[in-house]
Image: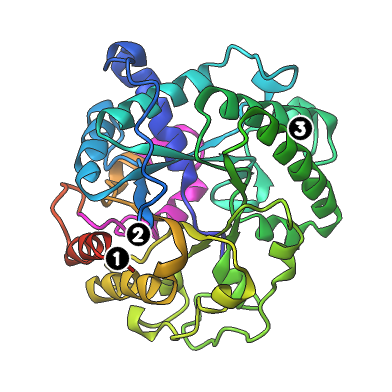
Amino acid sequence: MRNLRLPFLLALALLILACGQGTPASTLYPTAFASPPNPSTAASRPLMGFFPTPAEVSVASIIQTIHNMSAHADVVLIQQPIPWEDFVASPEANSKALNDTHNLVDLAAQSGLSPIFVMDPLNGLDRREFQNVPASWGKPTFADPRIRAAFRNYAVRLARDFHPRYLGLASEINTYMATYPDDADNFLSLYRETYAAIKAESPDTQVFVTFQWDQLRFPLPSTDAAKTPSKAIHWEFIEAFEPELDLWVISSYPCFYFKTGDAIPPDYYTPLLTKTTKPLAIGEGGCPSTAPGSPASQSAYLETIHTQLGERLAFWIYLLYNDLDMDAYRKILHTQNRGDDVDTLSWFVHMGLADVHGNPKPSLATWDALRASNP
């Protein structure tokens, strides 16, 4: 099964903001909120939020989505592909992609949401592939000096422009490392170089990568609900980044692995509590309200995360606030010659805590209750 995540939808959201109906993003809303509010470090519960993925492919929809989710969130997860050509020479690039990110941060700030950043070198629908690397560069690897320079320069620029509280340097990196072990050390060395460069620019920024937890627990990705997670967790993928890992961040979609949300084992996530003393976080995750999930499974998933990890979470990101208009996304994927991704997208269409029109599902009340409580 292909890796199940959707940061490419955020790239679409940025494109929408930049190009919506021919209107420049800077004229759609004010840009006077360049410094978003910073949540208190004394918070007794995790910072909670969503990806800002709109229900429909329009400027109005992304603005409405961010407005709607602001009543249920503290933060927004901004996960964007790396503008490789823009930043190959210097962190000082004049980059349209970065300008779009500034616009999205400003828009979120108007709704009281602070950003968490994850820069994404890999394809969000298949972690075995790079994303948006120029074809003229040939087959990409983390040994390529151009990729290393652009990666490092872009991270430094994000740190310089935003001084973010949290900055991730890759998502679900264990999938790529397991597929290309010969390139794993190249990424590790690049991560360490970039970690040091970020700390020089923004010492208080907490730096991390995310790990696909279900793939660390299961021998191979599978939707076979009869399978049992392995007792031998592949900790080596996480430990390879120590000590330059400020918190341990995972993604998890257990409803693709278990028959129901309440079938998640009571010790599915708890090994993290004893393996490290560092803060933990959920970088993304969710459960659909339709098969293979259900409305009850959505709520059970949320309660499981809270029960097993809540006391240690620094932040908790749920993938989608609202469901997606499949017809709208199918059309844009075909326009971008990405028709093969339509089937993968269908797994996520009903993963929101609200429906495509913004009407809350029962799971949104569960989320709000957990957000209001102290772990």
Find residue 267 and report its horizontal and vertical position in percent.
49, 84
For the residues labelled 3 and 1, the Cα–Cα distance comes to 43 Å
Camera-side mark, 2 or 3: 2
Per the rendering, the mark at residue 147 is: 3
Amino acid type, mark 1? Asn
Camera-side mark, 3 or 1: 1
Residue placed furthest toward the left:
359
Q: Quadrant of the N terminus?
A: bottom right
Find residue 83 and report its horizontal and vertical position in percent.
61, 26
| Magenta stretch in the rendered image | 330-354
Amino acid type, mark 2? Arg
In the image, residue 251 above or below residue 79: below
| Residue 292 visible in the picture | no
Amino acid type, mark 3? Ile
Find residue 368 and report its horizontal and vertical position in percent.
21, 60
Q: In which quarter of the image is the C terminus?
A: bottom left
Per the rendering, the mark at residue 45 is: 2
For the point 68% across and 60% down, the residue is: 174
Q: Does label 3 or label 1 sit earlier along the sequence?
A: 3
